[in-house]
Image (tube, rainbow, N blue to C red):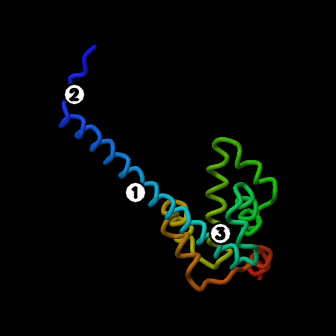
Amino acid sequence: MQNNMNLNELFALYGSLFSFFMLYIIFFIIHIGIIVFYVICMWKIFVKAGRPGWAAMIPFYNIFVEIEIVGLPWWVFLLVFVPGANIVVAILIAINLANVFGKSTGFAVGLIFLNFIFIPILAFDNSKYIPPTSLSTVSKT
């Protein structure tokens, strides 16, 4: 078997592989930056709600803490692992998260469909956390 590649073809091959690798690295760095920004936003939301910020970095525990923040029962966490029910739970969390920070239903819709925009808004605005128990007593009067 004879290798028929000349030097120009070899440089073209290595150049395209290098370009692909560099593009992959750039997208990877951007992806890591987005993840870090999202964790910072969730950290700030947890701190606003009186929970430890580091909880935003622990997988699954962050969902459990978020369920506590919005005032849903603990067993809702188990529904996160049920296909189909997890979507309903995510919608309930978004609606209740908007409520406990005094936001409107429109903001809740934004949290559901444009989470990457509305989570930073919630994290960096001056909204105050209203515990879910006081929400139920306020609505009754």
Amino acid at dot 2 = Met
Which residue position is annotated with label 2?
5
Between 44 and 108, which is closer to the camera in this rendering? 44
- Vertically, is 76 above or below 99? above
Q: Nearer the viewer, mark 1 or mark 2?
A: 2
Between 54 and 94, which is closer to the camera in this rendering? 54
Per the model, the C-alpha gap separating discs 3 and 2 is: 61 Å
Per the model, the C-alpha gap separating discs 1 and 2 is: 30 Å
SS type, badge 3:
helix
Per the model, the C-alpha gap separating discs 1 and 3 is: 34 Å
- Vertically, is 41 above or below 90? below
Which residue position is annotated with label 1?
26
Count all numbered tags in the image, as a single digit: 3
| In this picture, residue 72 sits left or right of residue 23 | right
Contact check, label 1 and label 2, Cβ < 8 Å: no
Which residue position is annotated with label 3?
97
Amino acid at dot 3 = Leu
Identify the residue at the far bottom of this view.
126
